[in-house]
Amino acid sequence: MMRLSKKWLGGDNETRDVIVVLAAALLLWEIGVRLFHPTPLILPAPSAIFAAFLETPGIFLRNLGFTLGMTCIGFALAVVLGVALAVGIVYSRLLERTIYTLLVALNSIPKVALAPLFVIWMGTGPEPKIAIALMLAIFPIVIDMVLGLRSVDPDMLHLARVSKASPWAVLTKIRFPCALPSLFAGMKVAISFALVGAIVGEFVAGSRGIGFQILVAQGQFDTVRVFVSLLLLGLVGTILFFLVDYAERLLLPWHVSQRARHERSTGRV
Amino acid sequence: MSPQASVQVSMDVAPYVAMNGVGKTYASSRGPVAALAGIDLEIRPREFVSVVGPSGCGKSTLLKLVAGLENVSSGQVVVGGRPLDGPPDRLGVVFQRDVLLDWRTILDNVLLSIEFTRKPRADERDRAVALLTRFGLGGFEHRFPWELSGGMRQRASICRALLADPELLLMDEPFGALDAMTRDDLNVELAQIWQDTRKTLLFITHSIVEAVFLSDRVVMMSKAPGMIVDTIAIDLPRPRRLAVRDSAEFAAYVQRIRHHFAELGIVKE
């Protein structure tokens, strides 16, 4: 217990830093509201927001669960599809010329504007939410993954050729692991985009989810419930981001960006 | 073996590597650029041949041609009796940069040359460990490349090239990025391992001292387009120790090569 608290208070601990910073921001907000008394219609105090959440936690959590589901499914599909597309683009000149060009062109359209189209195509169920989350999340993944797959030392590829490596061996043993740091960079952007996509989907049409919850609260000028939804979204978004970050540390202890941490944690200099 | 057992390679055995009238021309924005022209070079089996020349004389290109990594523009390269069409069999290559994969341990990096085509057998793992131990890396098998010094990394990359027991070993300025002391160490170790294994070895360097110390023959190249200007047989006793560098004969060889380069206006005397 002593050791735990020592570890918690002393030295370098990012989780602790994040929690301290967020708690400090909430505290300042609370103090600000108590000092300046803005009308709750504009800015409610964190304590009031927390109280509103406790009134109907079930409703909020059910809606949050729905949004989270849409986000995660959209994100997972974006990773699988994005990685497959990137491999295709790197290995095939034809796919590079066609798909990659199309993707870049499509990326320049504000994708939020396409959301109503998805409702026409897929209705008001979960499908358009997943599709919009997927569409937003896939771009950073494809673009970063293509970059990663291409950033292999040419001498490493020479070595593979000399050793008569098959294209499959080159992909799995060199290119793919080499691209993982880039993939994770893309995934960190993509996870936030997927959440945005799910919310946009719920804004456009639907009867569930945090996005829908915000629209309902807005219709009733219930600022407090809007804020509950926003804070829950912030919380979930942050947790999702750090989950990807954590997965990266777990999977890539060898990468330059992780080494300092690795060395610190193993006591190696 | 007595220290005086000078290794004389008989000149009437069929060459293992033969370059006949080889030229290499690259396309550039300012038209074709000749990197190599009229290269005639034969390397006997078990011979240690160094190629010395100024930067940009095409010595790395020469190595890539022998490795089958690039195609000749004119002439022919024959390795092991067969005209080249891609990398020849039983070839090991060491580059200036060690190109070890950061996510693999030193042992797994050494095994990579086999793993490209099949799963390494247990005896091959043992061989890899033995090789690493031979190169002073015993106990470092399970460390990662980024935990090792430049000299240790390059030793590992030499082990990787030797693991599959190649007939021909090509080394492209392997010690060019190392500090002077580490470089001396590796020179002695390479001379020793060559003595023990007697690979046919083509060694590219810009250090005259290194070339004289290691080789049976030193091939001198001039700049743009790279041509062979002279070939000097080095008749110094083996095994060679660093002390040989203090001998008058050694100094005479270095002097002769440097003088020749000076006459060509490549180095200042």
Image (cartoon, helix red, strand yellow):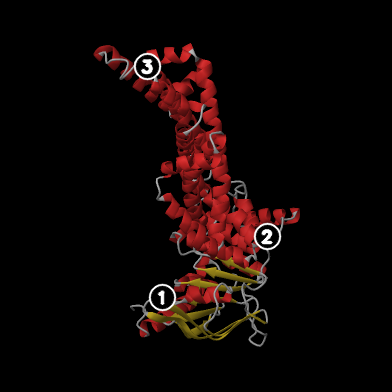
- Picture coordinates of residue B103, whole percent (x, y): 57, 48
Residue A11 position, x and y percent, is 43, 27
Find out whether the residues at labels 3 and 2 contact each other: C-beta distance under 8 Å.
no
Tag 3 subunit: A
Q: Is residue A28 visible?
A: yes
Q: Label 1: chain?
A: B
Query: For mark 3, what is the residue?
Result: A46
Residue A125, by quadrant, is: top right
On the image, numbered disc 1 is attached to which residue? B54
**Separation of disc 3 and disc 2 at Cα?**
62 Å
Label 1 SS: loop
Closer to the camera in the image, A131 or B90: A131
Q: Residue A139: where, in percent of width, then height? A: 47, 48
Q: What's the amino acid at mark 1? A: Pro
Q: Which residue is rendered at x = 53% and y = 17% of the image?
A: A58
Amino acid under disc 2: Ile
| Callout 1 crowding tier (Cα within 10 Å): few <14, some 14–19, many ≥20 | some
Query: In the picture provided, is A150 more to the left or to the right than B42?
Result: left
Residue B114's mark? 2
Residues marked 2 and 1 touching at CB (< 8 Å): no
